Amino acid sequence: MSQASKPPGGPERPGGLFQAILAGLAPRRPPAPEPEPAHWPEAPRAGPGHETEDVDVRRTGLVMAGLALSALVAVGLMLWLMHAFTLGQRREWPALTPQQTAKLTPPPPNLQADPYADIARARAAERGRLDGYALTEAGRARIPIDRAMELVTGRPLDPAR
């Protein structure tokens, strides 16, 4: 066949299919807007710069409630799936032996259970030794500090003088 006998735009024309695909993918133009009437009636205004319509509170509340509900459903589903997978994994674990479940006690010296009570007891014992009368092991008398200060005040510490 010669070039003159081929129909124009037929299947043998190079790039015809490519052009058809591009034409199908090209964005379509929206229809031309209708011309505006000469005069639109003006809505009453609350003042300069204010909107004349309010937000639909009911619709906004429904959207927010829907979002909150969907978030709660997603969290609940996630927690349920985590629980189900954990139970499946626990079934596969071997049972614990008595040695593994025995209560462990650390070796001594152990920490104080109530250090503040121990400090209070030590301070009370020390206060009793300082403020009370007693006999020492050497046979001397122990008297309170305040009484000893009263006895010594105004007297020389050296008995030879």
Image: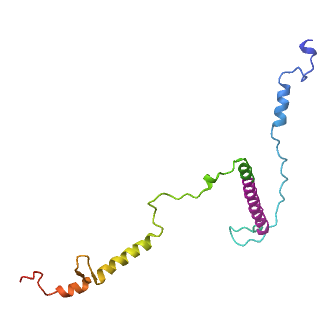
Q: Which residue is drawn at the image coordinates 62% and 55% (left, top)?
A: 101
Q: Nearer the viewer, residue 82 or 34?
A: 82
Q: Nearer the viewer, residue 7 or 154?
A: 154
Q: Position of residue 111 (x, y in %)?
A: 46, 63
Q: Which residue lies most toward the top here?
A: 1
Residue 17 vertical position relative to residue 76 in the rendered view, above or below: above
Q: Position of residue 66 (x, y in %)?
A: 78, 62
Q: Which residue is drawn at the image coordinates 83% and 57% (left, top)?
A: 36
Q: Quadrant of the N terminus?
A: top right
Q: Indicate left or right for 72 with 4 as reference.
A: left
Residue 23 vertical position relative to residue 41 in the rendered view, above or below: above
Q: Indicate left or right for 133 with 78 as reference.
A: left
Residue 78 covered by magenta stretch: yes
Q: Nearer the viewer, residue 16 or 160?
A: 160
Q: Quadrant of the C terminus?
A: bottom left
Q: Which residues lie in the magenta part?
A: 57-83
Residue 102 covered by magenta stretch: no
Q: Indicate left or right for 67 with 134 as reference.
A: right
Most prominent secondary structure in the magenta stretch?
Answer: helix
Q: Nearer the viewer, residue 21 or 57?
A: 57
Q: Quadrant of residue 71?
A: bottom right
Q: How many marks?
A: 0
